[in-house]
Image (cartoon, rainbow, N blue to C red):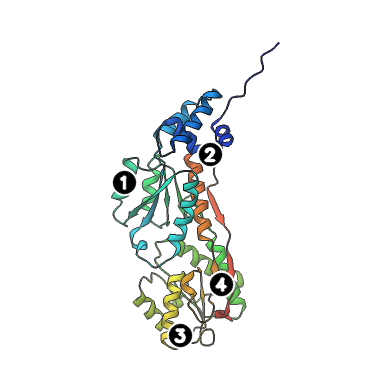
Amino acid sequence: MQEQEVKKLTMDDVAKELGVSKTTVSRAVSGKGRIGEETRQRVLDYIAQHNYKPNVMAKGLANNRTYNIGMVLQADLLSSDLPFFPKALKGISEVAAKEEYDVIMTLVDTNDLSRLARVIENHKVDGLILMRTLQDDKPAEMLKKSDIPFVTMGLSDDPQVFQVDNDHVDACRELTSILLLKGLRKIAVVSGDTNYVINRKRLEGFYKAHEELGYTPDESLIFTDVDSELFAARVTDTILMRNVNCIIGADDLLTSLVLKKLEEENMMIPEDMRLASFHDSQLLKAARAGITAIKFNTEELGRETCKVLLRRIRGEEVPQVTKLAYEVAMRESTK
């Protein structure tokens, strides 16, 4: 009688059968990383009973892993009032924790990447998430020269970079189109640092809406690189002298600063000025009139970015670009 062939177990099989993650199986096999002794023994006993032998590659990966993933954030953004980053971190941490990974933060400066270099050289993480993409993206260029997997939370013009983000171009095009179709022709935009790709993408959507509807935006009403409350106040003063009928803030912080200045000037919204934002957040909740804005699920963006990174760490195939959904919320401020 022919002997029945015994099915060869994989790490996925072991993880599924025991109700644990593949990371837990890897840690039990390698003897490295944080894992409860009872769980470790349960995995090892199951492996022994079923004669499971991890392949050489799996062993090598397990032995070399740190079970850390890193977030790379520009230092100047950490001191801002934007609620985006805490929400994104929450989403990242949720997914990382399920795979028993820890998250560490690395701050970089435009001209100083020494901290990121140390993380790479000392093998402190298994992969990295760049929290913002730049026009001149030195952190991404540094990571491309290393062997470490990384993903950007934000779109990039570099086709070699794996990226996850909302479709800001289409979202800003849609909101701007709605405002133009409402008869608002003199629209001013207050935007931030043009070295951040996200600000360029939002402006791209603004221009695209005008092009599709056959209108020409007034370039004198496009204000970029607005980087402080004082600058935002001065720009708002300039806008108010130019017979504008709507102002769009490129992000929630800038919109809130414009709103503050309008209120100081006793401008009523939407009676005296219509106001909208290319990004919604709690910063806009204090307005007397609801602010028209684009809603993104920032926690979901963090979760999806972390999932893509972990798949890259495991050597799985992932799409080069992942775009998430958005919602245009029309409110009182643009009636």
Give the left or right position of residue 216, taking residue 261 as reference: right
- Distance of label 4 from label 2 (alpha carbons): 47 Å
- Distance of label 4 from label 1 (alpha carbons): 41 Å
Q: Residues within 10 Å of mark 3 (few under 14, many from 20)?
A: few
Residue 242 is tagged as 3
| Residue 184 seen by the camera | no
The residue under label 1 is 117
- Distance of label 4 from label 3 (alpha carbons): 19 Å
Q: In the picture shown, does residue 1 fall above or below 269?
A: above
Q: Nearer the viewer, mark 4 or mark 2?
A: 2
Q: Which amino acid does label 2 sit on?
A: Val
The residue under label 4 is 176
Q: Which residue is drawn at 34% across and 62% down?
A: 76
Residue furthest out toward the front: 38
Q: Which amino acid does label 1 sit on?
A: Ala
Q: Is mark 4 on a helix, strand or loop?
A: helix
Q: Between residues 332 and 204, which one lies in front from this camera angle? A: 332
Q: Between residues 18 and 328, which one lies in front from this camera angle? A: 18
Q: Between residues 326 and 190, which one lies in front from this camera angle? A: 326
Q: Nearer the viewer, mark 4 or mark 1?
A: 1
Q: Between residues 156 and 259, which one lies in front from this camera angle? A: 259
Q: Is mark 3 on a helix, strand or loop?
A: loop
Q: Which amino acid does label 3 sit on?
A: Arg
Q: Which of marks 3 and 1 is in front?
A: 1
| Residue 103 seen by the camera | yes
Q: Residues within 10 Å of mark 4 (few under 14, many from 20)?
A: many
The residue under label 2 is 20
Say which quarter of the image contains residue 4: top right
Q: Is mark 1 on a helix, strand or loop?
A: helix
Q: Along the polypeptide, which appears first: circle 2 or circle 3? A: 2
Say which quarter of the image contains residue 27: top left
